[in-house]
Image (cartoon, rainbow, N blue to C red):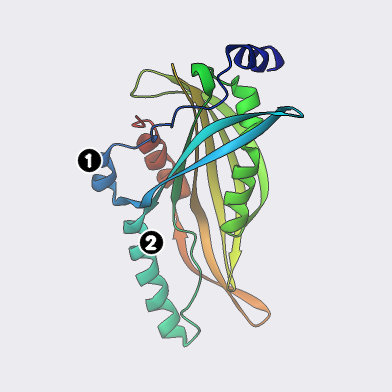
Amino acid sequence: MGAMLSAIVVSGCLEAPEASAALLDNDQLTIHGWLQVGDPEVSQIEHNITKNTVLTMSLIKVKYQDEEISSVVGGGIQNVTSRLHIDSKQAFPTPTIITYRITMPGGKKLPLETFSSLMSPSVERTNRDNNISSLRWGNTTELQLDNGNNANAFFYKGNFSGNGSYVGILGMVVTYNDENSSTMIIGFVPDGKFAVQLGDSRKELLFIDGRKELEEMTDLIQTVE
């Protein structure tokens, strides 16, 4: 990466053009019951090249969630907990996709390994903010995107716990470069038995087919523009 940064410094261009959002196909989102959450968030990442030189990269973030499954599962949880006369305010990890796209000065691109390292805190923060822990990384595969790019897909498993609720997690991180930018996509879905804590034991309320949800999420990610 040092040679790349040196080339940028020599060119005298240290500020990146604003990145365009990595958007998923709206028609497919509607079909599967997913929605974009809020507006795209634009920010900057600064990297110190030397004591007096700072490289500024442009970053744009977009978040999506599966409102359909959240509504269905939420209703199921409420029905079961009402019958059992227990607290119905149980937390549930809504299936989520977050896209990040970054641009560098001079149209340069980060090597994917460097980009993944730079963005790893975002992966950790996303899981931590959603009460997901005990990550176990598994298979890595190549994913063909509808935009013609080939992406690297890294899969992981984890555990969700919040407000006395527990369920497994299946997640993935996708990275790729195009002509002018680098893109990372983080996604996760609940998987398996959804349980709540009742005294010293756990009561299983629902079962979620995480493999099926992960396949749907992968199909959506492949539509990224």
Q: Residues within 10 Å of mark 1 (few under 14, many from 20)?
A: few
Q: Quadrant of residue 121?
A: top right
Tell me the number on the disc at residue 70.
2
Label 1 secondary element: helix
In percent of width and height, residue 129 lies at 59, 57
Figure disc tally: 2
Q: Is residue 88 above or below residue 34?
A: below
Mark toward the start of the polypeptide (1 vs 2): 1
Q: In the picture, which quadrant includes the C terminus?
A: top left
In percent of width and height, residue 128 lies at 63, 55
Q: Are marks 1 and 2 in contact (CB under 8 Å)?
A: no
Identify the residue under disc 1. 27
Relative depth, front residue between 12 and 150: 12
Q: Residue at x 63, y 12 (%)?
A: 10
Q: Quadrant of residue 52?
A: top right
Relative depth, front residue between 72 and 1: 1
Disc 1 to disc 2, C-alpha distance: 19 Å
Q: Which of the two marks, 1 or 2, is nearer to us in this view?
A: 1
In percent of width and height, residue 102 lies at 50, 31
Q: Is residue 87 above or below residue 192?
A: below
